């Protein structure tokens, strides 16, 4: 706004007062976003305040989708819709208790993992068997956990690029299933996270085919460390834990994908697809995960539009039910697989600054890759050489073997907040959020005005060509 | 330990090998504590791991007292006892739920305040009336809250000396009582704290005589801020809240004060009294509040002893039931009022570094005041000119009008943790904890070897003289 006024003031010296000032260029819009964007923050603030947590498949998620669709319409997006799909829905229940009963009786803070079974009313109680890693658990003899509760630990420390999630994530992703297969009556894990607050990190787990789900919970990091100290102090005496939780599977319910468009000058060209997800876990309003991502992509699309109608349509996809199994991503791909996407990008790693740009066309379209890299360097973004794989909600682009860009966010504090009650608005740094909008504006503006095939640099390919891309 | 070995090594060059090295001086012991003390941390680690939360008047607090007494005996303290007293006991229950029901339906994180009443089963629901300050609440007309739920906010930001607690504390201390007196059916406050985690700060509240207790809870800071944003967005539409909690008063139960001594060369001299409290709120193991304080005073007493038997007895008082109304402090004073205390000091403000020394005898015994100030300067402790008032568990010294010293701790992050589930072992910085032990060792060592009356500098006064002191 300040820049616009300055431009107007400068202009008034040299042209008749009635002349319309030229719109800011794309570069100027991106710079303006860095200093002044309010749309991204307003989106997250509104969503987290007026809706709050949005567990997939529930009425709260439906309210979130309605809120987002209304917001997009109010901001001038076209073709706004909430495209429905059905999904298997798990609910967390309202009881989550863990208590060490001997030898050091005290309560621990626990939350159920997605797909956890319920305990019987009153809970299950058993001796805790301590596994320092998933590999140690894998090595336990079959049947050795019969009647017992497994506790699985890990060492996870922050990394810039999120690689620590791949390192520690299996504790949650496969640990409970392995424990169940060896006869455990319950399992608790050290939260897959890096903070030290009494807020467990939930998240999905899966039980292998033929293995019945068991009660599976995450302890907060301080509680997990306390339990580990108990093992060091119990000197071989058994540690017993009582676990009570009442989550449940409720069968199929409806979810949906919210879409909206900034319509391009040539709507017959494949659109640029910007993705995020609108659902969150029940325990937090999902400011970082992924309200911020939805705010960023929508704000960037609006900013690109301010530089003039783009050549291609920019479509935003605020997917439903990402957290519980990428239901929205799968449904979107199934419904639209025959509609080519020019290039896909997703924002789903919080609200901290973008530090690296990667694509999957660095080899096949080096000119475009270099052009984008050069354009974002002034925002502190380096040119990466990883092959972009796209976010969770970009199944359609991967299914089409299409072009992908990853705008990597700083992950150092992402797993302090991820899937915990602490994922609230106050964690968002407005300055870093604006840097995201600036970088996205710059990148999306280039892509949406690219007249040739983004992937090959040659003529715009037909759908099958894109689908058979690199 | 390192210094001891170095001293031994140096000694071996000049004296026969069989000679006993002289003990470290008091100054050397204090320096050694700064580098090497493990007792304070071991106390907090053991208490928080093997006992956990210790709500006043419960069996968990009794286990905490037994654990502490056992630890003191094992470390060589004499005359260890758990001196019983009776108290009025409030229990928090196991249900604490708050849900905005309109217009922005979502759950908020709440915990009951000490002395809160229970809601009916199923909860109470009412329109929320927003008060930015206690003064605004005071100004509300009588009866104006009939059938409604009061929400009381404040602005609290960290301060070095804890003065922000006096500033914001009335919201909790008197706010609920005022709301009840004006007809409210419930009250929630913005937690009296400075963090941004989903962990409410509990703490005691009181209802005036003739005003029946109502359900009273604390919202976490992020939840309170969310509620305030709702008011900004509701544009005058009523915001309704459903509150459900089941705390209860259970009448009188037993608590106790744990005491132990390093017996002095002249046990007939009034002892130096070092105080802390052993109870915590139910929601955390009380590492900062006040496991650390008990660890610090016990570790310092042991360190002073290592410099040689002190002239005066050093008595530690690990008071019971501080949090719910200073029951232990009152009981101790009542039981021992006729036994003069030479000087009292308390550690009950976390585990961060000591930055200032104050006494209440700067005018009456300037030589001693200056001697102590000079001795602690090397630990980064400044000489203050406030008049020390002593900690919560030093009622006996105040009742005797005796000498008091305050070793002020850095309070900048104390109210991030105070009375929240987050008050866990991991929050303790071992280096700062050792600085506390070092300063306490230095100060207590001087006091316990002071042959003249600490308060006046004259002959050791009789009990009545101390009781009639300044």
Image (spheres, coloured by chain):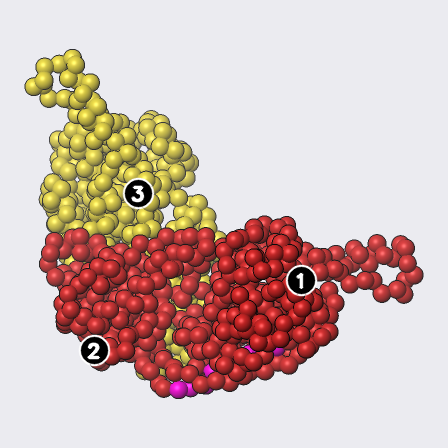
Chain colours: A red, B yellow
Upstream in the sequence, badge 1 or badge 2? 2
Which mark is nearer the camera, 1 or 3? 1
The magenta segment: A252-260
Above or below, A155 relative to B466: below
Q: Position of residue A177 (x, y in %)?
A: 26, 71
Q: State whether discs 1 and 3 lie on one chain.
A: no
Q: Secondary structure at mark 3?
A: helix
The residue that disc 2 covers is A122
Q: Are marks 1 and 3 in contact (CB under 8 Å)?
A: no
Within the image, what quadrant is residue A265 found in?
bottom right
Label 2 to label 3: alpha-carbon separation: 40 Å
Q: Position of residue B250 (x, y in %)?
A: 22, 71
The residue that disc 1 covers is A446
Q: Are marks 1 and 2 in contact (CB under 8 Å)?
A: no
| Mark 3 Cα shell of 10 Å, populated few (<14), some (14-19), many (≥20) | some
Residue A376 belongs to magenta span: no
What numbered label is drawn on residue A158? Answer: none
| Mark 1 Cα shell of 10 Å, populated few (<14), some (14-19), many (≥20) | many
Label 1 to label 3: alpha-carbon separation: 53 Å
Looking at the image, which is closer to me, B330 or A113?
A113
Which residue is depicted at the point 11% across and 44% down?
B74
The residue that disc 3 covers is B430
Q: Position of residue B33 (x, y in %)?
A: 26, 34
């Amino acid at each position: 706004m300040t820049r616009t006024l300055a431009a107007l003031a400068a202009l008034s010296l040299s042209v008749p007062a009635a002349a319309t000032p030229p719109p800011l260029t794309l570069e100027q819009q991106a710079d303006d976003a860095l200093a002044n964007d309010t749309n991204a923050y307003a989106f997250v603030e509104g969503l987290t305040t007026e809706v709050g947590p949005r567990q997939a498949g529930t009425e709260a998620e439906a309210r979130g989708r309605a809120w987002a669709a209304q917001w997009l319409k109010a901001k001038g997006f076209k073709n706004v819709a909430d495209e429905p799909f059905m999904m298997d829905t798990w609910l967390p229940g309202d009881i989550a208790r863990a208590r060490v009963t001997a030898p050091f009786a005290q309560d621990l803070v626990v939350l159920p993992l997605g797909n956890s079974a319920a305990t019987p009313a009153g809970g299950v109680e058993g001796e805790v068997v301590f596994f320092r890693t998933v590999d140690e658990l894998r090595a336990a003899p079959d049947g050795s956990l019969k009647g017992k509760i497994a506790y699985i630990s890990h060492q996870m420390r922050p990394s810039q690029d999120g690689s620590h999630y791949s390192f520690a994530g299996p504790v949650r992703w496969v640990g409970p299933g392995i424990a169940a297969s060896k006869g455990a009556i319950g399992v608790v894990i050290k939260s897959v996270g890096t903070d030290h607050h009494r807020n467990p990190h939930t998240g999905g787990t899966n039980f292998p085919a033929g293995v019945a789900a068991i009660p599976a919970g995450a302890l907060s990091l301080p509680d997990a460390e306390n339990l580990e100290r108990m093992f060091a102090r119990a000197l071989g005496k058994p540690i017993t834990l009582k676990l009570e939780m009442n989550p449940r599977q409720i069968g199929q319910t409806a979810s949906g994908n919210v879409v909206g468009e900034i319509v391009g000058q040539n709507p017959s060209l494949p659109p640029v697809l910007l993705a995020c997800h609108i659902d969150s876990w029940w325990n937090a309003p999902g400011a970082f995960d992924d309200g911020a991502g939805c705010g960023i992509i929508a704000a960037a699309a609006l900013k690109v539009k301010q530089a003039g109608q783009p050549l291609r349509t920019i479509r935003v996809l605020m997917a439903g039910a990402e957290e519980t199994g990428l239901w929205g991503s799968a449904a979107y791909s199934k419904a639209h697989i025959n509609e080519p996407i020019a290039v896909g990008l997703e924002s789903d790693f919080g609200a901290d600054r973008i530090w690296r740009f990667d694509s999957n066309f660095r080899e096949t379209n080096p000119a475009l890759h270099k052009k984008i890299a050069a354009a974002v360097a002034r925002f502190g973004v380096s040119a990466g050489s990883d092959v972009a794989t796209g976010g969770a909600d970009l199944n359609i682009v991967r299914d089409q073997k299409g072009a992908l860009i990853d705008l990597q966010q700083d992950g150092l504090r992402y797993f302090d907040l991820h899937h915990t009650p602490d994922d609230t608005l106050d964690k968002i740094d407005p300055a870093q959020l604006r840097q995201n909008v600036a970088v996205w504006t710059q990148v999306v503006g280039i892509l949406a005005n690219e007249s040739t095939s983004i992937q090959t640099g040659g003529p715009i390919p037909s759908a099958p060509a894109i689908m058979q891309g690199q």
